[in-house]
């Protein structure tokens, strides 16, 4: 790891801490040349995962693309950055559990909706309405009735924004 100040290539790790969900490691580093201290964050990265689109096209999995979709469904909803990152890690952990080199957009979408359903019901409905292409009010009402039957409590996560 190069120093962020003097660009020296030798830095040493002073301290390492695993996140509470075990999905990342924060390391405190010090440059051996200038003594500058800084932190780095290591996260698991999904490599060699191909997403098969509905029309048969294939593309590499993109965390950025997934987080944009999640963020869009959570727009103007109360959540913290930490809770959002935890959600992303849970989704990616479920993807890794599949132990396959490719997933269909349908499989990925179902994993996303499973986690959104417990994270934020409104975001879940927003995502599902686009993902499942709700054609009419009846389909929308049907999905709302399913949610009401489950009576899952909303998590009270204070907004950071």
Image (tube, rainbow, N blue to C red):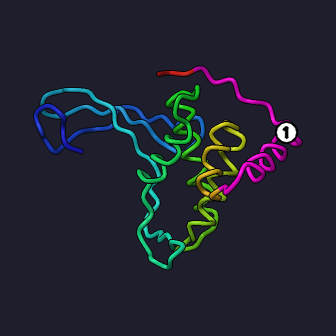
Stretch in magenta: 134-158
- Tell how many labels: 1
Apparent side of residue 1 relative to residue 63 in the rendered image (left or right)? left
Mark 1, Cα crowd under 10 Å, few <14 / some 14-19 / many 20+, is few
- The residue carrying mark 1 is 148
Q: Quadrant of residue 109?
A: bottom right
Farthest residue toward the bottom? 56
Asked whether 101 falls inside the magenta stretch, the response is: no
Q: Relative to 47, is 94 on the left or the right?
A: right
Q: Tell me the quadrant of the picture where the N terminus can be found.
A: top left
The residue located at (62%, 52%) in the rendering is 112
Nearest to the observer: residue 79 or residue 2: 79
Image coords of residue 2 (percent x, y): 19, 43
Residue 23 placed where, x, y %?
54, 45
Residue 69, percent from left and from top: 50, 48
Q: Residue at x 51, y 73 (%)?
A: 52
| Residue 73 lies in quadrant | top right
In this rendering, the answer to whether 68 lies above or below 54 is above
**Residue sitting at the far right:** 149
**In screen coordinates, is 136 left or right of 50?**
right
In the rendered image, the vertical position of residue 7 relative to residue 91, given as above or below: above
Report the side of 27 relative to 133 (left or right). left
Where's residue 96, x and y in %? 58, 62
Q: Between 156 and 1, which is closer to the camera in this rendering? A: 156
Residue drawn 26% across the image and 27% down it: 37
Q: Element under label 1? A: helix
Q: Nearer the viewer, residue 153 or 94?
A: 153
Magenta span contains residue 146: yes
State the residue at coordinates (59%, 61%). 108
């Amino acid at each position: 790891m190069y120093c962020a100040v003097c660009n020296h290539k030798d830095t040493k790790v002073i301290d390492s801490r695993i996140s509470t969900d075990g999905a990342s490691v924060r390391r405190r580093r010090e440059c051996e040349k200038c003594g500058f201290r800084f932190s780095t964050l290591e996260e698991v990265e999904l490599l060699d995962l191909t997403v098969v689109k509905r029309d048969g096209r294939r593309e590499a999995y993109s965390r950025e693309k997934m987080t944009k979709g999640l963020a869009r469904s959570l727009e103007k909803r109360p959540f913290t950055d930490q809770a959002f990152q935890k959600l992303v890690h849970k989704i990616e952990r479920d993807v890794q559990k599949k132990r396959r080199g490719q997933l269909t957009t349908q499989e990925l979408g179902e994993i996303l909706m499973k986690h959104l359903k417990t994270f934020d019901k409104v975001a879940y409905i927003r995502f599902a309405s686009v993902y499942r292409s709700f054609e009419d009010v009846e389909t929308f009402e049907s999905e709302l009735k399913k949610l009401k039957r489950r009576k899952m409590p909303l998590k009270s996560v204070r907004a950071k924004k």
